[in-house]
Every structure is written in C-alpha cells, then in structure tokens.
Amino acid sequence: MPAAPPCEDRPVNDTGPRALWRRAQHGWPARFPIVQFPNAPLIVALVASIIGHVSSGTLHDVARVVSLMGLIAWAVLEIVSGVNWLRRLLGAGFLAYLAVRALA
C-alpha cells in the first residue's frame, strides 16, 4: 500500500469559517482591492452600533464608545496597512470624518 501524500498535496476542504474569512480578506477586484470583507475592528464597530441603536442607558453609552473605538481602529489599520493607496486614503478620510464629527 503506497504512503499517503504529504499534507500539502492532499485536497483540502476549504469551506469552513476560517477558509471563508481568509478568502474574503483578499478583496475585489484581485489586482486592486476596493471592496473587502470587514476586518475584526469593523465587525466590532458594526455590532456595537446595532446594540447602541436598540438599547438605552448605560448599555447604549458603552456600545457607542465601543463602536467609535472600533471605527478608529479600523481607520488606523487602513492607513497603516491598507492594501493600496485607495484603501489608505479611505482610512485617512474616515479618520478625518470621525475627528470633525467629534469636534462638532
């Protein structure tokens, strides 16, 4: 009986959540990604924003702060490690928007 091929030669079931997350992070179009699946800080910000909209009191306040911190983290990550100049510009523009909104 022949030995099993090394792991890297075997077909991989690439349909689990981790595989989906990894594929979604590449963005579209492949040569110049404009659209990407949200990264962790953006997902946290979106979930916190939803919680803030459906809650009141202290939970509302905490959710708004978490949402803002997630958006700031996302913008800084785009500025520092965006895949192209457009993604870095998007991060910088959104960070400027958040700053103007906070000062208003």
Image (cartoon, rainbow, N blue to C red):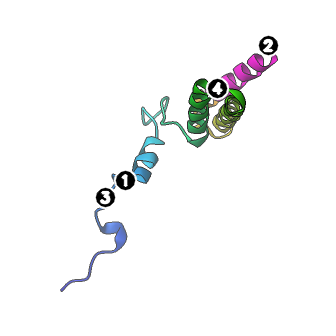
Residue depicted at x 52% and y 36%? 38
Q: Tag 2 or tag 4, which sits nearer the N-term? A: 4
Q: Do the residues labelled 1 and 3 touch (CB within 8 Å)?
A: yes
Of tags 3 and 2, the one toward the viewer is 2
Residue 5 position within the rendered picture, expressed as x and y whole percent measured from the top left:
29, 75
Q: Disc 4 versus disc 2: distance between alpha carbons?
A: 22 Å
Q: Tag 3 or tag 4, which sits nearer the N-term? A: 3
Task: Report the amino acid beneath label 1.
Answer: Gly
Q: Please state if 32 lies on the left or on the right of 7 as rendered.
A: right
| Magenta residues, start to end | 90-104
Of tags 4 and 2, the one toward the viewer is 2
Q: Tag 2 or tag 3, which sits nearer the N-term? A: 3
Q: Please state if 22 lies on the left or on the right of 50 as rendered.
A: left
Q: Element at badge 2?
A: loop
Residue indicated by mark 3: 13
Q: Residue furthest top?
A: 104
Task: Report the amino acid beneath label 4.
Answer: Leu
Residue indicated by mark 2: 104
